[in-house]
Amino acid sequence: MANYDVIIIGSGPGGYVSAIRCAQLGLKTACVEGRDTLGGTCLNVGCIPSKALLHASHMLHEAEHNFAAMGLKGKSPSVDWKQMLTYKADTIGQNTKGIEFLFKKNKVDWLKGWASIPEAGKVKVGDEVHEAKNIIIASGSEPASLPGVEVDEKTVVTSTGALELNKIPKKLVVIGAGVIGLELGSVYARLGAEVTVVEFMDAVTPGMDAEVQRSFQKLLTKQGLTFVMGAAVQKTETAKGKAKVHYKLRKDDSEHVLEADAVLVATGRKPFTDGLGLDALGLEISKRGQIKVGADWQTNIKGIYAIGDVIDGPMLAHKAEDEGMAAAEQIAGKHGHVNYSVIPGVIYTHPEVANVGETEETLKDAGRAYKVGKFSFMGNGRAKANFAGDGFVKILADKDSDRILGAHIVGPAAGDLIHEICVAMEFGASAEDLAMTCHAHPTYSEAVREAALACGSGAIHA
């Protein structure tokens, strides 16, 4: 048994970042992880491996569609799926070993095993009970399914199984047109699968700006994905390695069946707190299974904190990281802070989709007067040269003060471009501040400046 200032449960982006920050602040820190590797869902079966497959499949797309136009002649590459999975595994290994190194460097103890909290101030791992002045629950989330949909991770899979299918399916049905479904759907579409996305709502990526939703769906349709919108999945059936997806259209209650070699269930995620013993502790949990916390990320039990996917808010790795650092600062007697109005979201398809802050719909609902500055990547020289002219930058600014309230980007490197707008918003900048900042030519980032100019007297290249 050991005594610690802080024990963190879970080594995902929230947990491991929080552990390192606690150690940097002089706190004796341990992190509990039951997997054989650190990094949680994100590094092992989430963000990192999916980005490896997205990158590999995009390179294939470039070779098949754009190389010849650039004078790069030769046979299109064939897909060695086994080698692609090896590349993905190597990518995971490099990242998870990197966290092990950071733990050693910062003197964070890795307590190997699954945790439970028998009482405040104590964490049980295996047969050992460790004492901690503070406990941070960072146990993350797990895929949520639907009634009548049984996941076997072979034919009917979550994102975890979709990252290691034994072969590329001829027909893939994706249930849910959210971030995970569209990213993995686009991977398999590029690799030659016939992909059909079935979505309950009438628009993809629920909650995003409506104009982005429409444009994004059109672009993915152009890339070969088929969409069935307003459809309620009733059940799945599997037999002999094949699947059937039964759904009803909401508009007329008509029943339909799709046949597939694999079905990806991408209907969201739910907090993972199994085995922690939270009920016996008396920890307050919401109806949605989320741990309730105060402004300092502390639960209703003194000395027990929670961050990331187990609490309210978007289930994003970087949101968890910010909360992990902020909770560490609070425990160390400093002032931890997270600006929840400036948390970007990114979809890593091609083109990428990124957003931060308000949408036109949220501003209309709030009755706030705003203006829109928009610029198409077709007017950007670098994008045109790189066959990346699809999409646009849209900046929303307050009608009177010109302060930037939100931004939405569909286009090349959108996930990187969004951050200059995040920084601008963090400092309360106006669209004019962004418009008057010199941007290097030729870069994709000029499209952001042009959108900012469009909030004022007008873009130059439109």
Image (spheres, helix red, strand yellow):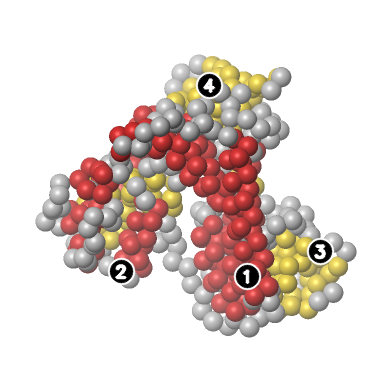
For residue 102, the mark is 1
- Give the mark toward the camera: 1 or 4: 1
Residue receiving disc 4: 248
Q: Is residue 195 shown left or right of residue 291?
A: left
Q: Is residue 27 shown left or right of residue 276?
A: left
Q: Which amino acid does label 3 sit on?
A: Val
> In the rendering, at what x and y percent does residue 403 appear?
25, 63
The residue located at (65%, 21%) in the rendering is: 242
Q: Which amino acid does label 2 sit on?
A: Gly
Residue receiving disc 2: 428
Q: Is residue 189 shown left or right of residue 275?
A: left
Camera sees residue 348? yes
Residue 154 figure quarter: top right
The residue located at (36%, 29%) in the rendering is: 222
The total of numbered circles placed on residues is 4
- Give the mark toward the camera: 3 or 2: 3
- Give the mark toward the camera: 1 or 3: 1
Label 1: which secondary element: helix
The residue located at (36%, 33%) in the rendering is: 73
C-alpha gap between disc 2 and disc 4: 47 Å
> In the rendering, at what x and y percent does residue 150 appear?
69, 31
Determine crowd level at label 1: few under 14, some 14-19, many 20+ residues with C-alpha closer than 10 A.
some
Determine crowd level at label 2: few under 14, some 14-19, many 20+ residues with C-alpha closer than 10 A.
few
